[in-house]
Amino acid sequence: MADDDSNFFPGDGPSSGISVSLTAGTLQAIRERVGKRGVSAYLEKAAQRQIERDNLDELIADFDQANGPADPEAVAAKRAKLTGTTPASGTGAAA
């Protein structure tokens, strides 16, 4: 009952073969990491990560449109808290 018009989330559904063109250097680097038989799985995971990044970029753009851009100093302070580092000083506009 599943067909090409079915709605699947990234990573779900049956596998489907396609043709993909990559530069020789990119393909070589992938094969060095995963071998010839791991290329499809590697590209699947890379595509899933890119979709996640695109979705996150869209969420951030929607948030910025509704609320304005985030305050860089507040972002730096929260990043420092999460990473256990000291916020960088002098990265914003002069006071």
Image (cartoon, rainbow, N blue to C red):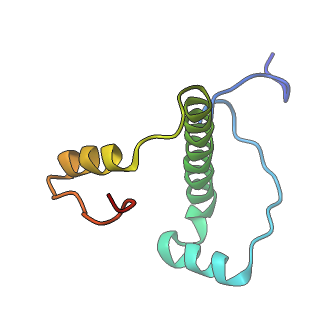
Tell me if 92 is positioned left or right of 6 in this view.
left
At horizontal 24% and vertical 63% (from top left) the residue drawn is 89
| Of the pair 17 and 10, the residue shown nearer to us | 10
Residue 40: x and y in percent read 63, 57
**Quadrant of the rendered structure where residue 12 is?**
top right
Residue 46: x and y in percent read 58, 55
4, above or below 16, in the image: above
Count the labels in the image. 0
64, above or below 22, in the image: above
Q: Outermost residue toward the top? A: 1
Residue 70: x and y in percent read 45, 40
**Quadrant of the rendered structure where residue 43 is?**
bottom right
| Of the pair 13 and 8, the residue shown nearer to us | 8
At horizontal 59% and vertical 65% (from top left) the residue drawn is 37
Tell me if 8 is positioned left or right of 84 in this view.
right
Residue 27: x and y in percent read 66, 76
At horizontal 32% and vertical 49% (from top left) the residue drawn is 73
At horizontal 81% and vertical 15% (from top left) the residue drawn is 1
Q: Quadrant of the C terminus?
A: bottom left
Tell me if 82 is positioned left or right of 25 in this view.
left
